[in-house]
Amino acid sequence: MNTLKFDLIIIGGGIAGLWTLNRAVSAGFNAILLEKDTLGGGQSVRSQGIIHGGTKYALSGVLTQASNTIKEMPQRWRNCLDGTGEINLREVNVLSEAHYMWSKGSLGSRMTTFFATKAFRGRVEEVSANERPRVFQNKQFKGSLYRLNELVLDVPSVINNLRKHVENRIYQADITHAQIESHDNTINAILFPTHALRLEADNVVLTSGEGFDVLAKKLDIRQPEMQRRPLHMVMVKHHYDLPTYAHCIGTGSKPVATITTHPCSDGKQVWYLGGNVAETGMDRSEQEQIAFAKEELATLLPWIDLSKAEWSTFHINRAEPKQSALVRPDAAYAEKVGNCIVAWPTKLALSPDLADQVLPLCGQPSSHADTNDLQCLSVLAKPETAKPIWETAFC
Ligand code: FAD
């Protein structure tokens, strides 16, 4: 049995695990990451890729803790994208430099009053008619449109760029299938007998998304608990070149629909629909959800003929720390239990904030570093990067 020692073993290769691995290695920690399936294949690659600045949450009329924490995120990501930030993400494909917010007709005045307040200065700009994205240039568009200081990223390219810096530290393994030596939430060793490997670490970071539930049972971690917030997402594949990145605002505090656009390998584009369409769609069958989304889009963008479009839906859960009444958690979350650090970013955008919270819980880098140890891990397979769901859903 080969015994290998690390400062950190990270379990789960979504955005949270990969971001934390990059930051940990830069800070001098001897860290590795174990992913059971594909990198990003949980929530991350299925996300809409919006790097929120919190404006959406502030619509309820108060600047909550969520909007204050998240406010800094677009600039931190922009620094990474131009190569001056905490992680070099220059190879990431930026789908849109801005996300927009629009409302129909009379509701526009509510937005105008709201965005005129001091709190939104520098975060939100009204867009004049000739600067609107093509989809909103139709004469039938009567609402008002605001440009938010938020990016939209192609998430598979983020995952690939993150993995590239730490490729030799990423391996495929499911620790629910490993033998674990632990007591009082402290993991002493993770054993893979078929590979004759015994892995020891000062700390184990659990960035396993929804997979935390199974691990918590195996490791007897009772706190923190996890919550799932279910979504029924909709995809519309069409032949238009109408890149659309926008929240449509109604009378409530949540967007009626959030649309992002993703190019497909066959040259078509997919409009990916979240927001209330997805949040209220849990009890609708796939057909009912498609009918609902068709009706919603026909009301929101009546000048776009989608009669020849292809439609598809799927269910997915967001995994987060448990909160009362399934409300949205306020910020990234990390808590240390024994030598396990349980971590959920709660938003892709908050991954930098998550790493800020996780690293101080890891103590100081030790002198475990031994490049031979990494070579011994080559008995484990390498995980692939997950494919976007719109590449497989319409086959
Ligand atoms: P995941 O991406 O789920 O990764 C967890 C990983 O752990 C998986 O790869 C899984 O295979 C692995 N794993 C689990 N168990 C084990 C185990 N036993 N051993 C090894 N590996 C294991 N946020 C935004 O900021 N902007 C958005 O536009 C946005 N849109 C979203 C749209 C949707 C439909 C959803 C669902 C979420 C969206 N989010 C968005 C939220 C965001 O996607 C998540 O907060 C984020 O991706 C979570 O990342 P993660 O790494 O914690 O989890």
Image (cartoon, grey):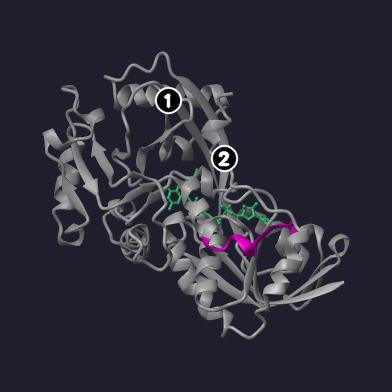
Q: Is residue 270 left or right of residue 255?
A: right
Locate residue 389: give its quadrant: top right
Mark 2 — residue? 387
Give x and y (percent) for residue 85. Answer: 36, 66
Q: Are marks 1 and 2 in contact (CB under 8 Å)?
A: no
Q: Is residue 45 left or right of residue 169?
A: left
Give x and y (percent) for residue 293. Answer: 43, 26
Residue 244's label in the rendered image is none
| Range covered by the magenta-colored residues | 165-175
Q: Is residue 390 left or right of residue 184?
A: left
Give x and y (percent) for residue 15. Answer: 52, 56
Callout 1: helix, strand or loop? loop
User: Label 2 is placed on what type of residue?
Assistant: Lys
Is residue 286 inside the magenta stretch? no
| Foreground residue among 361 and 144 | 361
Question: Which image quarter holds the C terminus?
Answer: top right
Q: Residues within 10 Å of mark 1 (few under 14, many from 20)?
A: few
Mark 1 — residue? 268
User: Label 1 is placed on what type of residue?
Assistant: Lys
**Is residue 337 positioned above or below 387 on the image?**
below
Question: Which image quarter holds the N terminus?
Answer: bottom right
